[in-house]
């Protein structure tokens, strides 16, 4: 886990192109934006949200509020904010927005499971599980 925390920033930034690619696939009916434009949209959304959420987390920590609860609420707000952003950018109705969002989560879940299986296979092959007692 130390290795993961050493490269946490890299994985954070890796999520932007992955999310943009999944968004491009999820909203495949909408031909308005290409992948690079989806990349800019995701970078904008994540950047704006990171600044806002950092300030809110610092404020909530100073007030003694539960850090994990605030973080989870902010994750839900990120999903809502991204959904609203895509709805406005594509000028689509709520039904199409929800279908695209659900498709995004389905693809994200499949990607996460596949990545987890590959990661577990790598750890098994490297002998990392032998160190666990």
Image (spheres, rainbow, N blue to C red):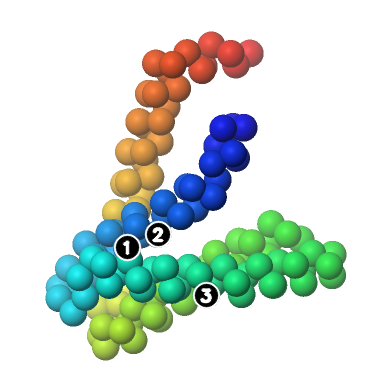
| Quadrant housing residue 68 | bottom right
Task: Report whether 124 appears left or right of 130.
Answer: left
- Residue 105 visible in the snapshot: no
Task: Report whether 26 appears left or right of 62.
Answer: left
Residue for point 40% across, 81% down: 84
Tell me which label, 3 or 1, sits earlier in the chain.
1
Depicted 107 relative to depicted 63: above or below: above
Depicted 46 relative to depicted 90: above or below: above
Task: Report whether 58 appears left or right of 17.
Answer: right
Tell me the tag on residue 16.
2
Depicted 43 relative to depicted 105: above or below: below
Q: Residue 16: x percent and y percent?
A: 40, 59
Q: Residue 30: x percent and y percent?
A: 17, 76
| Quadrant housing residue 91 | bottom left
Q: Residue 12: x percent and y percent?
A: 49, 53
Number of residues whose C-alpha sits closer than 10 Å to that of mark 2, classed few (under 14), some (14–19) or many (20 or more):
many
Q: Residue 66: x percent and y percent?
A: 76, 61
Residue for point 54% across, 50% down: 9
Q: Which residue is mark 1?
A: 20
Tell me which label, 3 or 2, sits earlier in the chain.
2
Number of residues whose C-alpha sits closer than 10 Å to that of mark 3, classed few (under 14), some (14–19) or many (20 or more):
few
Do the CB atoms of the residues marked 1 and 2 lie less than 8 Å apart?
A: yes
Q: Which residue is mark 3?
A: 48
């Amino acid at each position: 886990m130390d290795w993961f925390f050493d490269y946490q920033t890299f994985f954070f930034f890796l999520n932007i192109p992955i999310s943009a690619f999944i968004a491009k696939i999820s909203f495949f009916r909408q031909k308005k934006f290409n992948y690079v434009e989806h990349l800019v949209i995701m970078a904008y959304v994540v950047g704006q949200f990171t600044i806002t959420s950092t300030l809110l987390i610092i404020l909530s920590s100073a007030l003694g509020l539960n850090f994990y609860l605030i973080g989870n609420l902010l994750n839900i707000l990120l999903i809502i904010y991204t959904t609203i952003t895509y709805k406005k950018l594509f000028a689509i109705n709520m039904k199409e927005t929800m279908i695209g969002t659900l498709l995004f989560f389905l693809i994200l879940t499949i990607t996460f499971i596949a990545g987890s299986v590959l990661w577990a296979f790598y750890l098994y092959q490297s002998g990392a599980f032998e160190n666990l007692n």
